[in-house]
Image (tube, rainbow, N blue to C red):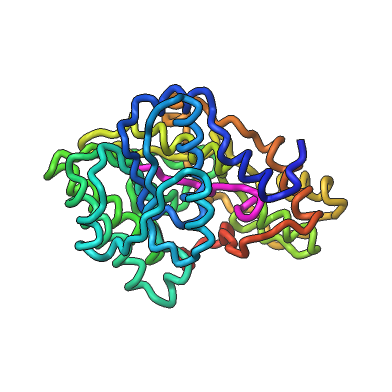
Amino acid sequence: MDIETEDQLDDVLTRPSARLIEFIRSVSSPLLLLGAGGKMGPTLAALARRAADEAKHPLEVIAVSRFSDPQVLEWVEKRGVRATSCDLFNARDIEKLPDATSVIYLVGLKFGTAKNPSATWAANTIIPTRVAERFAKSRIVALSTGNVYPLSEVKRGGSVETDALTPVGEYANAAVARERIFEFHSRNQGISIALLRLFYAVELRYGVLVDIATKVYANQSIDLANGYFNCIWQGDANDMVIRALSLCATPPSPWNLCRPEVFSARNIATRLGQLLDRVPKFTGSESATALLGNASPLCAQLGPPAVSADQMLPWIAGWVKRGGRNLNRPTHFEVRDGKY
């Protein structure tokens, strides 16, 4: 199956699995999605809506964001999601949000950290405090990032959840602070929380595989210094984020979120080159370390992600060949010094 249009892509990204349809019946209304205006939030909201509809479960899905792009607000509302504009820095705005027993936290700030680190630290500390105080009686799935780990030996197969969080760079350390703030409130207020450390969500308009495919097609060199990575199809990531509500605990339970295998940038570029009729160009060589996570524990709990690299790569190659829209938000997966 080829994906040729954004409507087709959005349909694939928001198509619920049988496991999600069954799980959504256990979620009390409303399901509150905070920070839902970013790359993952709109399709996550629509996915939850479709799952509830197919389960015939009267679940209201509420997407909360500043919605600085009115097209995003319109997109979610057309799909039966209630969109609520809110500045999550503002305690008064948060107080006006409806009570909810299930909350998914998607707020984050990464790129531009080097130019304005204070904004990143504020977003990753003040907002979690506001949210934890407002929703102290809720269970909260909070999206985190694999950047909370330092680089690890590739041969080890990725960092595990019990590893020390000693990363390099302001963004990564602010992400650690976000986790610690949630942990503090969980321990002090008894809030049930799951922390999901995401390693590179991918769809056709952005993601590490798109970054590599775009360079291969444009005959640009790929830096192999950070030669290994994890990733996961965004539809699978969103599915697992919702179902991770079942994993919330006090104190918080951390989980690595990605496909279980480690990908080689060289091998992926070579496979994309075959699909794109290009010969990839490389600079440098693979280091012994990379930013990697071991997702075996989460996959054991929720089941493995459904969409494989063998499915993603032809979709992405076809999209790039056709000149499909690119969000122009590169992952900078090749960065090793933590400067974003």
Quadrant of the frame with the N terminus: top right
The span picked out in magenta is 195-209
Q: Indicate the position of residue 281 as horizontal and vertical percent values.
A: 78, 59
Q: Residue at x 46, y 46 (%)?
A: 198
Foreground pick, 190 / 89 = 89
Q: Residue at x 34, y 44 (%)?
A: 32
Left or right of 66 in this view: 313: right
Left or right of 255 in this view: 212: right
Foreground pick, 220 / 282 = 220
Answer whether residue 294 is visible to the viewer in this image: no
Left or right of 327 in this view: 186: left
Left or right of 337 in this view: 192: left
Q: Residue at x 77, y 44 (%)?
A: 271
Q: Indicate the position of residue 190 as horizontal and vertical percent values.
A: 15, 39
Is residue 262 highlighted in magenta? Answer: no
Q: Residue furthest bottom?
A: 115
Q: Indicate the position of residue 37 as horizontal and vertical percent values.
A: 45, 57
Q: Is the residue 77 above or below the residue 334 in the image?
A: above
Foreground pick, 317 / 325 = 325
Q: Residue at x 49, y 64 (%)?
A: 70
| Quarter assignment of residue 139 | top left
